[in-house]
Amino acid sequence: MTVPVGPDGALEVYSAVGDAFAGRRIGFGRRRAALAANFARHRGRDDAAVAASWVAGLLAEIGCAAAADAPGETQPAGPSGPLPTDPDAPLHGAHLVAALPGLPAGAADLVRWHRERDDGTGFPDRLRWDGIPADAAALGIAHAFLELVEDEGEPRGPQEAVFAITAESGRAYAVELVRAFREFIAAAPDRWDAPPSFALPALDDEVVSTALNSGGRQTVPSGTSTTAVALTPCDRATAAADRVAAALGPDRIAAARAGACVHAARAFFHLTGAPA
């Protein structure tokens, strides 16, 4: 089955939830996913690796939802640029991705390690050099490139963004990956974020919600509701749900779906606590 690259796919709705909690434009994650998958294909990776890059690109910042209940300023209702990165967000995000059934092997690892740096100053595990899986490092490059292109204060053109990435070669990013990324952008200057199409089991809202509301367990005990987790009202969560609903459509169904997705993500982090 071919995954739809639009707002109807459950994973893409959760990607929008990650965008909202990270303070980004809704759709940033979907564009990052396309870029990561296309870059993986350019590097000759097989279908399974391309699919893992796409899923990890979609959900790379879903772990930001784990901080929804933390004290501090409320999440803005509109995009205002990314918030300071929580160094535990990749851990939380990987924990959630690993809990979802039917996703490509390795997708959770890419989420966990896409913010590592070649010089060992990244997070969450301070990996360095060949200790960083190449696909995770490639996702990190895709993420940094898109941040530059979509920077609200000083957006860069693709070539200028590539120049900035190249300047970090050997420090933040592996030299050979930067070289491959430069070749990739040069070969497809207008198509680097074109929606990819590949075979992958599609997950619907019920499958994702069941997995998250059961703390990632594959089966829910008999008689246990998948929506029984009680959570206190949260300004950040409300603002995130409102932004996702506005992106999905102006109807009550979209609002309900966005609210349910935000609730399921919060419920998962409430049930599972901090990952190792």
Image (tube, rainbow, N blue to C red):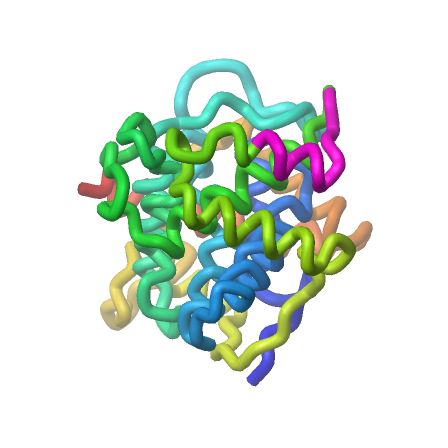
Q: Is 155 inside the magenta-drawn segment?
A: yes
Give x and y (percent) for residue 217: 25, 64
Q: Is residue 118 above or below residue 83?
A: below
Q: As drawn, is 274 to the left or to the right of 268? A: left
Q: Residue at x 40, y 32 (%)?
A: 172
Q: Residue at x 75, y 45 (%)?
A: 246
Give x and y (percent) for residue 34: 61, 59
Q: As drawn, is 30 to the left or to the right of 220? A: right
Give x and y (percent) for residue 52: 43, 65
Q: Assign the N terminus to one quadrant of the image.
A: bottom right
Question: Where are the magenta residues, as a range?
Answer: 154-164
Q: Quadrant of residue 164?
A: top right
In this view, the residue farthest toward the bottom is 1
Q: Is residue 88 above or below residue 267?
A: above
Give x and y (percent) for residue 41: 53, 68
Q: Quadrant of residue 221?
A: bottom left
Q: Residue at x 73, y 59 (%)?
A: 191
Q: Is 252 inside the magenta-drawn segment?
A: no
Towards the viewer: 235 or 34: 34
Towards the viewer: 231 or 115: 115
Q: Assign the C terminus to one quadrant of the image.
A: top left
Q: Is residue 206 above or below residue 276?
A: below
In this view, the residue farthest toward the top is 72
* Residue 259 is at least partly visible in this image: no
Q: Main secondary structure of the magenta part?
A: helix
Q: As drawn, is 247 to the left or to the right of 198? A: right
Q: As drawn, is 67 to the left or to the right of 187? A: left
